Image (spheres, rainbow, N blue to C red):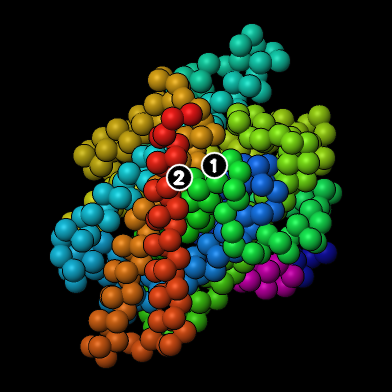
C-alpha cells in the first residue's frame, strides 16, 4: 500500500480523533486512580446497586460541562476571574480554597494507592516489598522531572494510552463476568443501601465523576483555545461524548468488581484487592496488568494536580500562566511533597482515596450556583440566550449537588464516629 492511500485512509480517522480530542482529554483527566478505587469498591460492596449514582453523576457532568463552556465563551473569561469580577473576591476565593483542598486530598490519596500497590506487588521478589516512601519518591521525581523539562505533553500522551488499555481491560472483564439484567435494572433505582457505610462511597463516586477541578480545567481550556459562540455545538457534542464514555468505563469497572469480588463476598480493603477484578481476563498476569494500569492512571492524574494550584492562583489574580517562574515552581514542588503524607505517616489508602474524592461534592453546589447565575446575567445583558432545557438542567444539577453535599457530610460524620 502506497503512502497516498495510507494518507487517504488515516486522514478522516485523524480528523475524527482531533474532533473529539477535548472529550478524550476530559475522560483522561477524570478516569484515574480515584475512579478505579471508588467504582471497584462500590461494585465489590454493593454489586450494581449504586449504578444510579453513576448515571446521574454522568448526566449532570454533561450539563455542567456545557454550562461552563458556554459561560466561558460568552463572558470571554475563565471561571475564577469571571466569578471574582461578577460576584466579588470572597465568592471566588471560597471556591478556589475548596478546589485546593480537593487537589491536595486527591494527591495524598492517589500516591497512597500507588505506593501500596507497588509494595504488595513486589513482595514476591523483595522481602516486605518496596518501601512506600521509596516508590513515592521515585514517582514524585519522575513527575517533577517532566515538569522541569517541560516535556509533559509526550509523557501524558504515553500514560493516557496505558490508561485507555486498562479501561479496555475492565470492559472485556465485565463482558466475561457480566452482571445479570436484573442487577443492572434494579441498579437504576435511586436508593442508599441499609448495610455498611455507603454515604461516603456514594459521595466519592459523584466526586470522581462530577469533579470541580475538571470543570475548572475545562474553563481554562475553552479560554486558551479561544472558542467562540459558533463553536458551542462542538462543545455540546464533545461534552456528550465524554459523559457517555465516562458512564461506560466507570460502569465497566463497577461491573468487573461486581462479577468478581462481590460474588465471592469480598470487599476492597487494600489497594491490591482490586487486582482480582482483572483476574478473569488476565489470569496470573492480572497483578502486573493492574499495576501498570493503576500507575499510569495515578501519574496521569497526579501531574495536572501538581500544577493545578498555579492555574487557580493565576486565574484568580489574572496573572500570566508562566510555569517557569521560580515562585510557581516552588509551589509545584511544595504541592508534590504532599504526596508523601501516607508513605511517611501511614494510613489506609483505599479509605483515604474514597474520602478524598468525597470532598468535591462539598464545593459543587457553590460552583453550580455561580455558573448558573453567570449565565443568567449574560442572558439579561443580551450576550446569549439560554434554553429552557439548560435552565432546567442547571436547576436539577443544583438540587443533585446539594443532596450530594448532605450525603458527603453524613458520610464524613459516620466515618469520624465510634467504630
Residue located at (59% from left, 48% from top): 194
Closer to us: 178 or 202: 202
Residue 188 falls left or right of residue 365:
right
SS at mark 1 in the image: loop
| Quadrant including the N terminus | bottom right
Crowding at dot 2, Cα within 10 Å, few <14 / some 14-19 / many 20+, comes out as many
- Count of numbered tags: 2
Residue 156 falls left or right of residue 150:
right
Residue 206 falls left or right of residue 304:
right
What's the magenta region?
7-16
Closer to us: 191 or 69: 191
Q: Position of residue 125 (x, y in %)?
A: 69, 13
Residue 249, numbered label? none
Magenta-colored stretch includes residue 13? yes
Q: Position of residue 19 (x, y in %)?
A: 57, 71
Please tell me in which quadrant of the rendered image residue 292 appears.
top right
Q: Earlier in the sequence, mark 1 or mark 2?
A: 1
Q: Position of residue 18 (x, y in %)?
A: 57, 67
Q: Position of residue 280 (x, y in %)?
A: 82, 40
Residue located at (66% from left, 35% from top): 267
Secondary structure mostly seen in magenta is: helix
Closer to us: 25 or 59: 59
Crowding at dot 1, Cα within 10 Å, few <14 / some 14-19 / many 20+, comes out as some
Task: Decide if residue 25 is in sight here.
Answer: no
The answer to whether mark 1 and mark 2 are in CB contact below 8 A is: yes
Residue of label 2: 411
SS at mark 2 in the image: helix
Residue of label 1: 197
Task: Decide if residue 186 is in sight here.
Answer: yes
Amino acid at each position: 500500500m502506497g503512502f497516498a492511500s495510507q494518507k487517504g485512509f488515516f486522514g478522516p480517522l485523524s480528523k475524527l480523533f482531533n474532533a473529539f480530542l477535548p472529550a478524550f482529554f476530559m475522560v483522561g483527566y477524570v478516569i484515574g486512580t480515584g475512579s478505579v478505587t471508588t467504582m471497584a469498591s462500590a461494585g465489590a460492596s454493593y454489586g450494581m446497586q449504586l449504578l444510579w449514582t453513576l448515571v446521574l453523576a454522568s448526566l449532570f457532568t454533561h450539563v455542567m460541562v456545557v454550562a461552563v463552556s458556554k459561560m466561558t465563551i460568552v463572558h470571554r473569561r475563565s471561571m475564577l476571574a469571571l466569578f471574582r469580577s461578577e460576584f466579588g473576591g470572597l465568592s471566588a476565593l471560597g471556591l478556589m480554597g475548596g478546589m485546593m483542598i480537593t487537589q491536595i486530598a486527591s494527591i495524598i490519596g492517589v500516591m497512597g494507592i500507588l505506593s501500596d500497590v507497588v509494595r504488595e506487588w513486589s513482595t514476591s521478589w523483595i522481602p516486605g516489598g518496596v518501601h512506600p516512601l521509596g516508590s513515592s519518591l521515585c514517582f514524585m521525581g519522575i513527575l517533577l522531572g517532566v515538569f522541569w523539562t517541560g516535556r509533559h505533553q509526550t509523557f501524558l500522551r504515553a500514560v493516557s494510552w496505558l490508561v485507555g488499555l486498562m479501561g479496555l481491560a475492565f470492559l472485556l472483564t465485565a463482558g466475561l463476568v457480566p452482571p445479570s439484567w436484573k442487577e443492572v435494572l434494579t441498579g437504576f433505582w435511586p436508593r442508599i443501601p441499609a448495610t455498611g457505610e455507603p454515604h461516603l462511597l456514594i459521595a466519592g463516586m459523584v466526586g470522581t465523576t462530577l469533579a470541580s477541578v475538571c470543570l475548572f480545567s475545562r474553563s481554562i481550556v475553552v479560554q486558551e483555545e479561544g472558542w467562540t459562540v459558533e463553536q458551542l455545538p462542538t462543545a455540546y457534542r464533545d461534552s456528550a461524548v465524554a459523559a457517555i464514555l465516562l458512564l461506560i468505563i466507570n460502569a465497566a469497572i463497577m461491573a468487573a468488581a461486581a462479577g468478581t469480588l462481590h460474588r465471592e463476598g469480598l470487599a476492597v480493603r487494600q489497594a491490591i484487592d482490586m487486582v482480582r477484578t482483572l483476574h478473569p481476563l488476565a489470569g496470573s498476569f492480572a497483578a502486573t496488568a493492574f499495576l501498570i494500569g493503576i500507575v499510569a492512571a495515578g501519574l496521569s492524574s497526579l501531574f495536572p494536580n501538581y500544577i493545578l494550584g498555579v492555574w487557580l492562583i493565576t486565574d484568580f489574580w489574572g496573572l500570566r500562566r508562566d510555569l517557569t517562574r521560580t515562585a510557581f515552581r516552588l509551589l509545584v514542588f511544595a504541592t508534590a511533597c504532599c504526596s508523601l503524607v501516607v508513605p511517611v505517616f501511614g494510613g489506609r489508602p483505599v479509605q483515604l482515596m474514597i474520602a478524598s474524592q468525597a470532598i468535591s461534592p462539598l464545593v459543587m453546589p457553590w460552583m453550580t450556583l455561580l455558573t448558573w447565575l453567570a449565565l443568567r446575567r449574560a442572558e439579561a445583558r443580551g450576550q446569549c440566550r439560554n434554553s429552557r432545557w439548560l435552565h432546567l438542567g442547571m436547576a436539577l444539577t443544583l438540587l443533585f449537588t446539594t443532596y450530594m453535599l448532605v450525603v458527603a457530610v453524613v458520610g464524613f460524620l459516620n466515618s469520624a464516629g465510634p467504630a
